[in-house]
Amino acid sequence: MLLALAALLMAMHVYAPAFLSYRNLINVLVQSSTLGILALGMTVVLITGGIDLSMPANMALSAIIGGMFIQNGGDPAVGCVIMLASATAVGALNGFAIGYLGMIPFVVTLATMSVASGVAAWLSEGLSISKFPESFFDVLLARIGGVPISVLVTILLTIAGTWLLARSIFGRHLYAAGLSPRAARVARVPVQKVTSSAYVFAGAASGIAAILLTARLGAASANMGTDGVVLDIISACVVGGVSIYGGFGRLYNAALGAVIITVISNALNLLGASYFLGLVIKGLVIITFIFLDARGKNK
Amino acid sequence: MMAAPGLVLSNISKRFAGVSALKGVELTAAPGEAMALLGANGAGKSTLMNILGGVIQRDEGVALLDGHPLDLASPRAARAQGIAFVHQELTMLPTLTVAENIMIDHLPTVGGLIDFKALKRRTQDLLTRLGCRFDADTRVGDLGPGDQQMIEVARALSRESRVVIFDEPTSSLTEPEKQRLFGVIQGLKSEGVIVIYITHFLDEVFATCDRVTVMRDGMLVSTGPVSAHTVASLAHEMLGEGSLAGDIPTAVPPADEVILSVAKLTRARVLSDVSFEVRSGEIVGLWGLLGSGRTELLRALVGLDPIDSGSIRLKSSGHLVTVTPSQLSRSTAFVTEDRRGEGIFPGQSVEQNLSLPTLRQLLNRFGLVDRSRERSLADDLIGRLGIKTSGRGQDIATLSGGNQQKIVFGRWLGSQPTVFLLDEPTRGLDVGAKTEILRLAVEIANGGGGVLLVASEPEELMRVCHRYLLMDRGRIVGELGRGATRDDLVARVSNRAVDEVLQ
Ligand SMILES: Nc1ncnc2c1ncn2[C@@H]1O[C@H](COP(=O)(O)OP(=O)(O)OP(=O)(O)O)[C@@H](O)[C@H]1O
Ligand SMILES: [Mg+2]
């Protein structure tokens, strides 16, 4: 996959020299950070064999709730906590319905997605929430050693998450439950708890993404969670080799997948391709990787 | 030169990722002959048959039928040349019916559509021939492994064949079904079909086979008439010098202290009013036909299946305390009879498969799994159980069936549970490994644990049990003491079969 990324960068260097400029590269990384964090959450869910379609809508809703709080004079730090908490709560709702009530992930999260984006549009009345105090941006847009906070946060979460999934009991249980829920139950894995926790993590990831994205855009709006974002998240995961059948996948690969998807989007932009052509190309990328996944599985 | 009629496999070799699984193996069989293929777990029997069945490709060697080279490029190609394969692991599609599963690769059609009438009639004929008591319309997922095994057999017989391979067909069958299967094999032989029969029940070899080929570590050890052998000589050839595990120590008589007490456990249509006790140090055999509720009882105890009523009490710090099934499961080891469906985690390493239930004991001070302790736990269990693997990192799915079974059992040894529920724990194990597992069961009991053991082989129960509970239709219908003979046990089971016919 690193090879694919290198090849992509080389091609960009030839066709659009502006791409490899330091500014543009940092820009790409900042853009990938939101997607990367969403992909981390999605990966945890995909490992259980499920899917969370509600992540972008959840991100937008929590950004709006927290954003309204800050706009009305609330402490920005508390506003961030509100974003994180509300997104996690929606994730917990998904988790309860799927893990404990045994409802189907696709349907549950489709419904939550619809509710969340509905509420988001209603609360914000379709407008974007902005005019945040400087202190909000001072921290979140800061750079440490030239690297933006959002990129650092993503890298840290990726490393810690990868490590925890490989080494913690929860991580081991997650892979086991995703690979074979029946065998996992026999081996004393609390499958219901593990499955529902995965959606809580996805919710929390949506909340963190909401904070970083709101800071970057300087505004919160219902448009943050368009359909295209789900496509990007899933693309990042499958490009990162996360199996949609459950049981396999590494967080750092999903994060790299997010970088690749962002580079592709960015490249298409620089080359002047239309948004729609972008959708077509990303769709094709997903199908190719799912094909590879299915072939690997049959071996 | 006139080509000899029959099957010739010659100089077959196969390597997997640098490990030799087969090294120049030979196997021949004449029409109408049943050839037994024996060997310890991991000897390469299934690999050899997978080559003959077109499932995997050989690296070297020749395969001839009646002097003509066989095209073994795919299972379909092998099938078209009359090679039928009853696999060691069940390969059913659980959401389809029995009939659809049996005829899956040659569904009868009228005008391009499936002819359901013909499908049903033909399947029903086959099922009757095999003496199966379920209907052709039953969903396969609703049947237990024994019944599914009979469907595998039916599928192999549903087409004309020249060669029929049976890879451990009896490992989940009870006595009456076994007898019917042997009848079917006799029928095949008299029609001139070549039968290749893999088993770990050595007495079956004498009942059904004419010649026997023994393999060890991917190599041919001997081939010759069955009459030249005894059970002991076969075991010796399979396992090699000195590897016959010593005998099972006698289980000491159990203490008086009851550690598990079950009262009136009931689940609609599956279990009714099941009450019994297990004492510390006791090995209790559960004996009954397939579908008598043995497996269902074990599953209900640990909460894998729901219960409607009843109570479970478990000894905990000196007292019998009422517990829920999920609480009981925390101090209980459960070895499933369905290794493939709910035993192994395919795609994960031997090591991860072994450590899963004991992770909590492997944590370092940061609450994370200590990799070096995990590795040494795995290496220790691999050594103790004689698991044949290229290393603890090998994907469990590529282990031989018997070696997977050792892992499904062995993963509980680290956690020191008080109660062991063993559902066919020796399924697919060679004679040496079987003894080893039973020896471990005795060790567990002698250490004060309680064991509930389900086995379809009366001999196996008789080697270790203190007492037998007889089950029928979800009830405990009787109890036999240690002195019970094989005939006592078998009589109880066949009585029921007779009742059934009379009704
Ligand atoms: N795909 C594979 N990759 C690596 N090793 C393999 C693979 N398939 C089989 N092996 C190895 O080949 C050896 C022979 O396995 P095989 O399944 O033929 O044994 P077997 O004689 O059928 O044993 P059992 O009695 O336990 O069924 C084993 O050591 C196994 O680990
Ligand atoms: Mg085998």
Image (tube, rainbow, N blue to C red):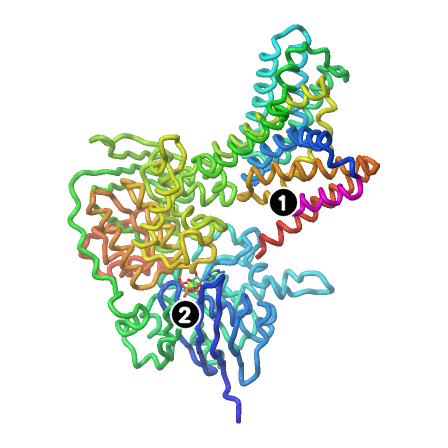
Subunit of label 2: B
Instruction: Tally the marks.
Output: 2
Say if B34 sits above or below A264 in the image.
below
Q: Does the magenta stretch include residue A9?
A: yes
Could you tell me residue A272's position as x and y percent? 84, 36
Q: Label 1 neighbourhood size at 10 Å, few (<14), some (14-19), many (20+)?
A: few
Residue B345 image position (x, y, % from top left) = 46, 48
Q: In this view, does A113 lie to the left or right of A165?
A: right
Q: Crowding near pointer 2: few (<14 within 10 Å), some, many (20+)?
A: many
The residue stretch that appears in magenta: A1-16
Question: Residue B260: x and y, percent?
Answer: 26, 38
Residue at the image position 47 percent from the left and 39 percent from the top = A166
Q: Which of A44 and B257 is in front in this view?
A: A44
Drawn side of residue B493 relative to residue B161, left or right: left
Q: Are marks 1 and 2 in contact (CB under 8 Å)?
A: no
- Circle 1 sits in a helix, a strand or a loop, which is it? helix
Q: Is residue B203 left or right of residue A221?
A: left
Q: Distance between the residues labelled 1 and 2?
A: 40 Å
Q: Name the residue under label 1.
A: A2
Check disc 1 and give the amino acid type: Leu
The C terminus of chain B: image quadrant:
bottom left
Q: Name the residue under label 2.
A: B218
Residue that appears at 53% across and 77% down: B162
Which of the four quarters of the rendered structure image does ligand 1 lie in?
bottom left
Q: What residue type is labelled 2?
A: Gly
Within 8 Å: ligand 1 and the Cβ of disc 2?
yes
